[in-house]
Amino acid sequence: MMLSQQLGSSRTSLKPDHLLHSPDSFVRAPLPGMEKCTAIIHAGPALGARFTEYTAEMEEGGKLGPAIGQRFFYVVSGQVQMENKFLDAGSYGYLPERHLVAATKETQLIVIEKLYQAINNQMPKAFTGNIANIQQQPLMGDEGVLVQSLLPDGPEFDFAVNLMTFVPGAALGMVEAHIMEHGLMMLAGGGIYRLGDNWYPVMAGDFIWMAPYCPQWFGAIGKTPAQYLIYKDWNRHPL
């Protein structure tokens, strides 16, 4: 049965302090300047977010359009070229200004853009990396919840992107509620996410936006590890 014929059913749920955006409701459209590429916009100012996050689906030879502010991208599948570097799945890049990002084959990227908040004129420089070179660290001493920090924690960065991996049955050790907002893309596995007073089954391909102070908690369910890429704003005074 086609998704469009399921009598209005969808797992997507929008509340004042969170969004669960499931693939059964994704809409695709190119952004200005894109070539052979379409975007699935998950979060942006229209939602109340202070950043933009989207999935870019690129054909061979496809190109991202110009960034609005600083840009981070993560290669889910395929390969892109940035200047003289070729970046495969698991690679990522940070771009403080416009750089050409082109696909060498069919590629899927997660893209995050945010207007930069400067401190002492310290603007980060462009760089690339790969998760294979980032050591996993236990979260709050829990060996079942592992975090990889993809951006340096220096004061020049006004946001962070982490890769979180949960062994089956592992869960966050507390319900968090804080001033930072999140954009989260499920990459593998699944589990249960508490958002506000709601509990949602989530799986690979789902996106979640969490507003500041939205109560949040995750527990992994299934036989394989759950993994997600998560954005947060930080390193700046609330005022």
Image (cartoon, helix red, strand yellow):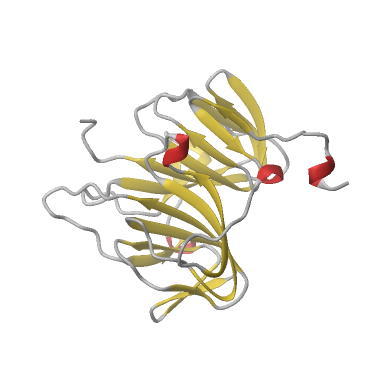
Q: Residue at x 48, y 26 (%)?
A: 17
Q: Is residue 173 above or below residue 76?
A: above
* Residue with the most extreme left position: 120
Q: Residue 217's x, y, as percent?
A: 53, 27
Task: Say which quadrant the C terminus sits in.
Answer: top left
Q: Nearer the viewer, residue 110 or 164?
A: 110
Relative to residue 188, is residue 200 depicted above or below?
Answer: above
Asked whether residue 172 appears in the rendered view, the answer is: no
How many circles with numbers are drawn on the protein? 0
The spot of residue 68 in percent (x, y) is: 35, 56
Name the quadrant containing residue 125.
Answer: bottom left
- Horizontally, residue 118 falls left or right of residue 228, namely left
Is residue 24 at all visible to an observer of this figure? yes
Q: Residue furthest bottom?
A: 84
Horizontal side of residue 213 vs 228, given as left or right: left
Could you tell me residue 235's position as x and y percent?
A: 25, 41
Eyeballing the image, is 13 above or below 27? above
Residue furthest to the right in view is 1
Q: Residue furthest front?
A: 32
Residue 194 pos. (x, y %)? 57, 25
Nearer to me, 15 or 156: 15
